[in-house]
Image (spheres, helix red, strand yellow):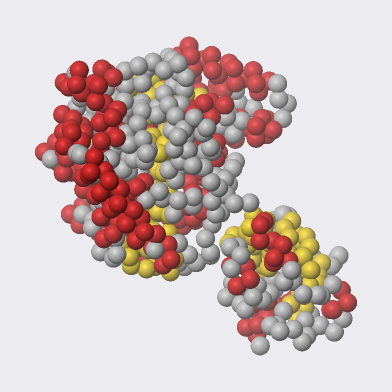
Amino acid sequence: MRSIESGLLTLEDWRHAYLNGALVRDLVPARARRLFDQGPEQAWILQVDDDAIAQRCTELDAVALEHEDRAALLRALPLYGVPFVVKDNIDVAGLATTAACPAYSYVPHSSATVVRKLLAAGAVLLGKTNLDQFATGLVGTRSPFGAPASVLAKDRISGGSSSGSAVLVGHGHVPFSLGTDTAGSGRVPAGFNNIVGLKPTPGRVGTVGVVPACRSLDCVSIFTLTVEDAAAVLAVVEGPDTYDDFSAFVPGRVGWPQSPRVGIPRDADVDDDIGYDVAWRAACNALSELGVTVKNIDFGPLHEVARLLYDGPWIAERLAVVEPLLERHPEAIDPTVKAVIGRARELRAVDTFRAQYALRRGQQVARRIWDEVDLLMVPTAPRHPHFDEVAADPIGANARLGAYTNFVNLLGWSALALPAGFTPNGLPFGITFIAAGGADAALVRWGRRWQQAMALPLGGTGQRRSPAEPPSWPAAEPTLPLAVVGAHLSGLPLNIQLTERGALWRETTTTSAYYRLYALPGTRPAKPGLQRVPEGGHAIEVEVWDMPLAQFGSFLALVPPPLALGSIELADGRHVHGFLCEAYALADAPDISRFGGWRAYLASL
């Protein structure tokens, strides 16, 4: 399937266009016209008119004319001139918000926090997208505005509730869009459309200006074609929101060890009739090839938590939003949505407390999972229904899709849905990595590693992109890169001094070709000494680790003479802190530079 403009799919594509002198008015209005003419009409609820788009382009071009340095402009405005769309339960000042229910429609005076941040970063809004009414559903069919299809399977659903946002990204019409996620609405549509769906830790992104589904659980989600783009958008929209009672932003860890422990369901429930079983096994094999430790996990306790979402009192949060409309105009609400939300009228106050106790028990049990593994990998959805399957059993078909999504927000965790290949008959198959709350930065860095290994086409465009570093990553605990060359390498005796301080492996690389390595005599454990030389040097293998700044002082105190920390030049020209050796200690030390690194030298003994 061809994208609308094959050259402009990702944020990096748009960034390069502007770095090369393109004007916003040359690119965005043309993209908008083609999108409105050729994009699936079921994906839309509202399109921004041409005059408003032109005015926004003129404003941004005027800003560009004030900057001689385009690179500096793009650092200041990381989403400069990039088109996007938002799910129509997210407020945009002056545009109607319907939540896919025309009788509910209102025009807000101010935009949602996330929209304000995106516009401040230079992005250009093109419209508002279709959804399962009041964000109640994982199917994308519960809307009077139509039911978008998967970009790769016209007879199958797109997934919901963020259906339109996912489909427009999957077609390559926009590089990113916003959805929301309470039970999986930012993940299931990603899986069905071969795209990336990033669901942040609850509270990491402000939800002021978002029509609540379950206000205490809701997350704004991000759809993109690449992990780098999802990370870059999250870096713009994350942060504390003083007007959001549920805001709880805390920077998290930057990554996991080089070989993290990944938990998978002991008996994954996937549909073998459509080849999901084959695709799941292939994903597990791909995971193993990344050098991780794979552990089978009992998901029973997580499924118990998941049942609370729709069988417990959280359904009353949905009723809190629509109850006035339900009383005045019950006919305005989709029959299935009405049936789901209507169950809340049967709940009693005591049911709420009992469910809270059950959730607290479930949280305690689930927390122990992180003692066994660093992250989880699950099928994003266990099956991919046809439209007629959903029509025949709208509640049952929907419920089955949430098997691996419903528990995540109740537990306060983060999740990243990623493409994982295709079934034997060509259906897209997706997996989701799940991590503890606050691990968003670690999750996207791991997701980038998965994406590089899989090298899949982007959405339904049929195109691929080489991985690119995004303009910025989500916020994480401040760290300092540290290059180690000897006994601190992975698996060697002093590596524990790094890991017990929370240091995380970043990469294995080499120094520039201006160093010599020596075996220091009489050291226990055995250690090398690294010295920079003006000529006659070698590239020496090193590992670069991210050391938390708060732990750097205690680590420095462990470094014995003649070793010291200094600046080391890497092969690509970067400079990082690392181990060097005072010259006096090298006089009688054997020169082992020819081995190219400490590991190779040890292997020769």
Rendered-image quadrant of the N terminus: top left
Determine the residue located farthest toward the left in the rendered image.
392
In the shown orientation, is residue 337 left or right of residue 544? left
In the shown orientation, is residue 397 left or right of residue 587? left
Rendered-image quadrant of the C terminus: bottom right
Give the x, y percent position of residue 410.
Answer: 34, 47
Q: Nearer the viewer, residue 453 or 177?
A: 177
Q: Nearer the viewer, residue 142 or 503?
A: 503
Give the x, y percent position of residue 99.
Answer: 31, 25
Determine the residue located farthest toward the front in the rendered image.
350
Q: Which residue is depicted at the point 52% across and 15% down? A: 54
Q: Which residue is depicted at the point 30% across and 28% down? A: 321
Number of numbered tags placed on the structure image: 0
Relative to 281, is 214 above or below?
above
Give the x, y percent position of residue 534.
Answer: 86, 65
Q: Nearer the viewer, residue 544 or 314?
A: 314
Q: Which residue is depicted at the point 36% across and 35% down? A: 215
Determine the residue located farthest toward the top in the rendered image.
51
Relative to 216, is 564 above or below?
below
Relative to 179, is 470 above or below?
below
Give the x, y percent position of residue 293.
Answer: 43, 69
In the shown orientation, is residue 536 left or right of residue 419? right
Q: Quadrant of residue 533?
A: bottom right
Q: Is residue 166 visible?
A: no
Q: Which residue is depicted at the point 72% across and 58% down? A: 576
Q: Is residue 112 visible?
A: yes
